[in-house]
């Protein structure tokens, strides 16, 4: 005589059958939403770009610490710790405000850690230009990752969008989608390598103030249009979806 499995047993079995794509989908979806990929509440490219940048506060958090360092270092290069301390202090203020207002502190906290690590390296070497070393490394790493993903046919943009719309990796069976995601990954790779190509020679030439200025110029002003292009391209491929993992 067989017994009917309980509801709890059925739930356990269902959970056990969760596929790897479900797990990866959740991970990619969360990652994309953290960078503004969730457009459930945004219907325009401008709205998506603004959300990806974190709104007005996000723009300030991205710009002010570096801008503070550049301005102070330009006019008062010595002592070095002054410009570094003010830059890290600015990032710390944003982080404290996030915690005080109980808003999401991840971006500000990440900026504070990055600013602190960069400042520590510059203080250790005694060279202000080393405040930008981690940025150079990041550009090289991201540029390489996007390029390799495009070349091997597993575009990082395709993976993010595929999991956001609940398609997983099925987009790889569609030639049009593969082509669009290939070129989007190439475009992102080109952005990071362009930053590296401009900034690395300035680093080697000890042009610290100019390096900092161009880092700002090649930051959000280049990031924002490419976010818009990426979102518009993805939206054209999935006109019946909100890019949030659910049908509209």
Image (spheres, grey):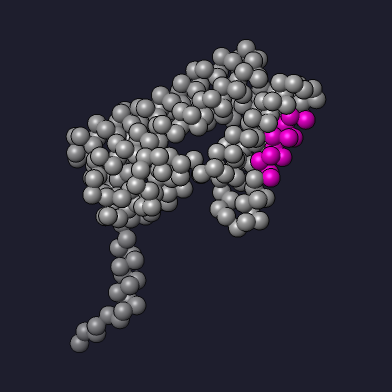
Answer left or right for 141 relative to 81.
left
The residue shown at (26%, 55%) is 247
Residue 80 showing in the rendered view: yes
The residue shown at (63%, 35%) is 64
The residue shown at (64%, 45%) is 94
Residue farthest to the bottom, as pictured: 1
Relative image position of residue 14 (x, y in whole percent) = 30, 68
Main structural element of the magenta stretch: helix, strand or loop? helix
Answer left or right for 8 relative to 224.
left
Q: Against 9, is 78 above or below?
A: above
Q: Nearer the viewer, residue 115 or 228?
A: 228
Answer left or right for 75 relative to 91.
right
Q: Is residue 71 magenta?
A: no
Check the picture and name the quadrant holding the N terminus.
bottom left
Q: Residue 177's quadrant in the figure?
A: top left
Task: Tell me how many marks there are.
Answer: 0
Relative image position of residue 93 (x, y in whole percent) = 69, 45
Q: Against 68, is 172 above or below?
A: below
Q: Nearer the viewer, residue 155 or 210?
A: 210
The residue shown at (37%, 40%) is 45
Q: Nearer the viewer, residue 79 or 154?
A: 79
Check the picture and name the quadrant holding the C terminus.
bottom left
Q: Against 242, is 177 above or below?
A: above
Highlighted magenta segment, given as a residue range = 81-93
Relative image position of residue 185 (x, y in whole percent) = 35, 31
Answer left or right for 12 relative to 90.
left
Q: Is residue 92 magenta?
A: yes
Relative image position of residue 197 (x, y in whole percent) = 49, 17
Q: Nearer the viewer, residue 162 or 69?
A: 69
Q: Residue 231's quadrant in the figure?
A: top left
Residue 159 showing in the rendered view: no
């Amino acid at each position: 005589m067989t017994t009917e499995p309980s509801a709890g047993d059925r739930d356990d079995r269902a959970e056990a059958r969760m596929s790897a794509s479900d797990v990866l989908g959740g991970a990619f979806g969360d990652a994309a939403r953290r960078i503004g990929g969730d457009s459930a509440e945004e219907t325009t490219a401008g709205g998506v770009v603004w959300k990806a940048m974190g709104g007005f506060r996000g723009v300030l958090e991205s710009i002010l610490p570096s801008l503070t360092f550049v301005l102070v270092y330009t006019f008062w290069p010595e002592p070095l710790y002054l410009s570094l301390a003010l830059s890290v202090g600015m990032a710390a203020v944003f982080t404290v405000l996030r915690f005080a207002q109980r808003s999401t502190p991840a971006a500000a906290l990440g900026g504070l850690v990055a600013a602190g690590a960069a400042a520590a390296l510059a203080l250790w070497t005694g060279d202000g230009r080393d405040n930008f070393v981690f940025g150079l490394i990041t550009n090289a790493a991201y540029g390489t990752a996007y390029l390799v993903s495009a070349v091997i046919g597993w575009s990082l943009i395709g993976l993010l969008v595929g999991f956001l719309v609940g398609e997983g990796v099925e987009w790889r069976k569609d030639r049009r989608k593969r082509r669009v995601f290939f070129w989007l990954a190439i475009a992102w790779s080109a952005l990071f390598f362009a930053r590296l190509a401009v900034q690395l020679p300035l680093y080697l030439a000890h042009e610290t103030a100019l390096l900092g200025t161009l880092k700002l110029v090649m930051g959000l002003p280049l990031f924002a249009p490419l976010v818009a292009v990426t979102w518009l391209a993805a939206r054209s491929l999935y006109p019946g979806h909100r890019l949030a993992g659910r049908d509209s």
